[in-house]
Image (tube, rainbow, N blue to C red):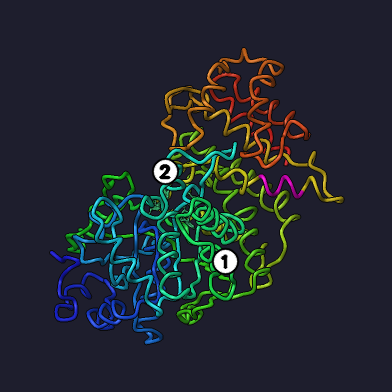
Amino acid sequence: MLHLSDDIHNGSAAWQKAGVTLPTYDIEAMRQATKHSPTWVHFGAGNLFRAVHAPIAQNLLESGATDRGILVAESFDPAIVDQAYTPFDDRYLQVILRADGSMKTSLAASVAGAYPLGEDPKPLHDLRLVFRNPSLQMVTTTITEKGYALVDSQGQPLPWIAPEFEGGSDKAKSAIAVITALLLERFKAGALPLALVSTDNFSRNGERFGQAVRQMADEWIGRGLAEKGFGDYLRDKNKITFPLTMIDRITPNPDKEVGRRLKALGIADAEPFRTRGGTAMAPYANTEETWYWVVEDDFPAGRPPLEKAGVYMADKDTVNAADQMKVTTCLNPLHTALAVFGMLLGYPTMSKTIADPDLKALVTRLGYVEGLPVVEDPGIFSPKEFLRQVIEIRVPNPGLPDTPARICADTSQKIPVRYGITISKYIRAKDLDTADLEAIPLIIAAWLRLLIGSDGNGTDDAGRPVKLSPDPRLEELQRILVDIPLNGSAKKETLTTTIKSILADTSIFGTDLNATPLADKIETFLTAMCRGNGAVASTLHKAASAW
Ligand SMILES: NC(=O)c1ccc[n+]([C@@H]2O[C@H](COP(=O)([O-])OP(=O)(O)OC[C@H]3O[C@@H](n4cnc5c(N)ncnc54)[C@H](O)[C@@H]3O)[C@@H](O)[C@H]2O)c1
Ligand SMILES: O=P(O)(O)OC[C@@H](O)[C@@H](O)[C@H](O)[C@H](O)CO
């Protein structure tokens, strides 16, 4: 059986027989060069990093455009490194799943070192030295939307952030605090330049990343735990930048069936698992063929030649338009709509959700009718064609084992971006009427309907408990919704009072929906969806038939 830590330079025949493309660059030389003069550090060692960032570095190494790999750090779940990197010599298999059911598999070795930032202080110590090195050019992140939050909706520090505000860099544990502590190290090493590049899924991600880092630093400066010059350094655009980005590649959690197919090819390292910290990992990462990464070209310390690997380097406005197109109208809102209904209607995969004609009609309306009018054309690709590919090719890909449950994680955090921005654009636009929105209120009603239940279980359309994906607002929302009856006895007037506080929550919707025509529509749809088993499907069908 083949192992990822095999000597692949001298034993390639068996790998080739298994259909796995191997790196041809000298892995040891790459590691030495990266150790001596690192250019790229990534935070968040999860699956998207393995689907996009590490393959880009591998591509640049293969073409000779660089001789350096990536150093990857993990602060939230250091067990990812212990369980999914170290045992496999930091290598993994990148598996592209095509619609015809075939797989394209390559062994990726572009990770030059992995840093689990947990109890053991050594990895952080080593990373400090990396940040003191003038060669470092950029830090990328995939730490989820939640990873950037420092305060709650009242402006109070989150419980795990408060000790970091109080204690300064010595107490840094969260990704933002660790990155700020490492920037402090870089400041002390001569105020060296660096680009910090968020590649998480939300609009103006770089701006939010910058705000979070500066807020952390200001807390330290205010308490005398860092000098004032550090704050100036973080605000000096010749030194530190936070470019905007759009990143796109549908990357499901590692799938068991993919592991089984790899094993059948003779590959021993092919078992998916949950890490001790709960992340779904495997010695492989499965993803789709299509990918986009659009990056604002603002790198004060220089950068790897990313464009040579297919990355779009662009100005701020272009990136912002591309990102708004993807995350607020043409992909992620469709994903959430299908995933929420998928949970309610019992569809096991995303490709099965969009095979339902009513759900396809829902996302067609959501994308073309409600989304496209507020989209600004980024110029580098057509929003209409992007949308067509999402609806006709990418989500329906039967080879891609993506699940509604993955996409439903943290829905409360995603709604402001996925629907809130479109709602606010309708409210502001003179030539658009919020009252014309139909798909968005239907989806919000479906989300509330799904949450009715208790203890982390919602209720599906057959009246069965369904395990809900993790969400920081889940407990609080379920407490409000728990008494809504699902047997048809719910009265719209009572329900209106029950959900008023949720619809008023601007941290979820970006707007007080009670002040818009959407509240009445959400209440009407939700009342209809509570009329017994099958009421979700019939409400959806009735709406879809009218479009
Ligand atoms: N998977 C995709 O299809 C996809 C595509 C585009 C963008 N993204 C973005 O990438 C992010 C990660 O996706 P993934 O597929 O790697 O997920 P994953 O579950 O494989 O990994 C999640 C990563 O985020 C880290 N993380 C989770 N919560 C955190 C927190 N509170 N603070 C700091 N780090 C935290 C984890 O430790 C892990 O490194 C998504 O949230 C999204 O913003 C994902
Ligand atoms: O990654 P999240 O949790 O922000 O969102 C779930 C999916 O919608 C998302 O991962 C998409 O697959 C991705 O945005 C496609 O590029």
Tag 2: Cα neighbours inside 10 Å, few (<14), some, or many (≥20)?
some
User: Foreground residue, 255 or 125?
Assistant: 125
Type of amino acid under label 1: Asp
Query: Above or below — where is 370 with respect to 134?
Result: above
The residue tagged 2 is: 163
User: Foreground residue, 437 or 243?
Assistant: 243
Image quadrant containing the N terminus: bottom left
In the image, residue 406 lies at what x, y percent?
43, 45
Type of amino acid under label 2: Pro
Magenta-tinted stretch: 420-425
Of the numbered discs 2 and 1, the one sitting upstream in the chain is 2
User: Foreground residue, 4 or 236?
Assistant: 236
**Residue at (57%, 66%) from the top-left corner?**
232
**Residue at (73%, 38%) from the top-left corner?**
546
The residue tagged 1 is: 232
Q: Secondary structure at mark 1?
A: helix
* Position of residue 186 in the picture relative to residue 330 (left or right): left
View extreme (left): residue: 1
Q: Main secondary structure of the magenta part?
A: helix
In the image, residue 146 lies at what x, y percent?
49, 47
Query: Above or below — where is 22 with respect to 423?
Result: below
In the image, residue 24 lies at what x, y percent?
27, 82
* Position of residue 35 in the picture relative to residue 143 (left or right): left
User: Whole-Å distance between the Cαs marked 2 and 1?
Assistant: 24 Å
Residue 95 picture quarter: bottom left
